[in-house]
Image (spheres, rainbow, N blue to C red):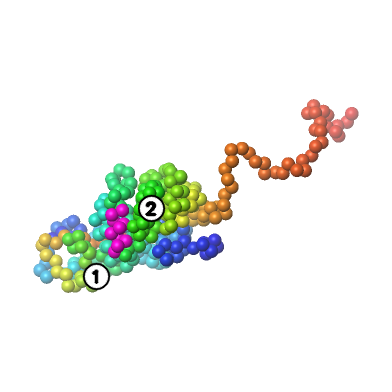
Amino acid sequence: MAEMADPFVIAGRTIGSRLIVGTGGITSLDVLDAVLEASAASLATVAVRRVDPAGRGGILDVLRARHVEVLPNTAGCFTAAEAVLTARLAREAFGTSWIKLEVIGDEDTLLPDAVELLAAAEQLCDEGFVVLPYTNDDPVLARRLEQAGCAAVMPLGSPIGSGLGIRNPHNIALIAERSSVPVVLDAGIGTASDATLAMELGCDAVMVATAITRCRQPVRMAAAFRGAVEAGYEARQAGRIPRRWQAQASSPVEGMMTLDAPPLDAPPLDAPA
Amino acid sequence: MFVNGRAVAAEPGMSVATLVAQWCPSAEGIAVARNGEVVPKSAWPSTDLGDDDRVEIVTASAGG
């Protein structure tokens, strides 16, 4: 209901869900289908990879049947040039100019390479792509990406696949507060409460892959994330109470009885004398 | 030539369209790069391949 009143819009397109699902790590297309249904996602990422000579595939068919839009990514790219070529291939293959831009610095951390990321973002924005960059939890870099023309920013909570949650909530809140494009928390989510926190910090949406696809019961977890994102969004909109150093009674003082209580060792009133 | 990192004998006059037909059951969701440049689908039939070409044929895979 609230989402109808305040739709989630990127580059002029209304996205039906504030939970974006990553397909990485999914164990089968059947599980993917069930996860998409349980999550109610309307946008899901895919990677661009060499065709499999064995003919495996069909991920696009699963997304299409669920009316889930494809968000191709540039996962695995280390340079701006690789990412730009991957984005161009994705546009040609899937007929979408949307690209989740990932340019990583090394394989151990999978953290974004800020210099290459910004260069790729500038190039792709110039070429008319709708660029959604996976970025560090750095408010300054987020602003630079926005100034380059990115349609959203996707700061990490913690390293990809780590499940460490949001390690710097203050920076995520800063990014959300200062950004004039949508902020999608990406990477590091471990469980549903992390997604709720992201929304409470002011993010517009959350992207989840590993936390769903590699957990023990992915379909159940997808449903949990659906509720978690909605709960965080609703709580944020409702406006939380301020934090206090001291207690504040929730029951009124007015109307308190003033009867003197009997001593603890007094016999019960109805006891025989 | 190299197709997806594998050495493949380039048949004379082979086009990108012919190669894709050999490698993929359908051209749906497929893109091709030749020597680091995207070959648009409309240019597949008219783009001939030779021994020096490095071709990448890609599609969607679980990721991200």
- Distance (Cα) linking label 1 and label 2: 36 Å
Q: In this orientation, which residue lies closer to the viewer: A206 or B14?
A: A206
Q: Which residue is mark 1?
A: B41
User: Is the N terminus of chain A in the top left, top right, bottom left or bottom right quadrant?
Assistant: bottom right
Q: Residue furthest top?
A: A265
Q: Which residues are magenta?
A: A118-127
Report if residue A133 lies within the magenta region.
no
Residue A81: quadrant of the picture? bottom left
Q: Residue at x 27, y 62 (%)?
A: A88
Q: What type is the residue that disc 2 sits on?
A: Arg
Q: In this orientation, which residue lies closer to the viewer: A72 or A146?
A: A146
Q: Secondary structure at mark 2?
A: helix
Say left or right for B58 vs A153: left
Q: Which residue is mark 2?
A: A143
Say left or right for A239 vs A27: right
Q: What type is the residue that disc 1 sits on?
A: Lys
Q: Residue at x 41, y 47 (%)?
A: A157
Q: Residue at x 51, y 50 (%)?
A: A200
Q: Chain of mark 2?
A: A
Question: Within 10 Å of the Cα at label 2, are there few (<14), some (14-19), or many (20+) other Cα atoms?
Answer: some
Residue A258: quadrant of the picture? top right
User: Is the C terminus of chain A in the top left, top right, bottom left or bottom right quadrant?
Assistant: top right
Identify whether A266 is placed above or below A32: above
Mark 1 or mark 2, which is nearer to you? Answer: 2
Is residue A131 at least partly visible in the picture?
yes
Q: Secondary structure at mark 1?
A: helix
Identify whether A119 is placed above or below B15: above
Identify whether A215 is placed above or below B24: above
Q: In this orientation, which residue lies closer to the viewer: A228 or A178?
A: A178
Same chain for the residues under marks 1 and 2 in the image? no
Residue B32 pos. (x, y %): 23, 64
Report if residue A120 lies within the magenta region.
yes
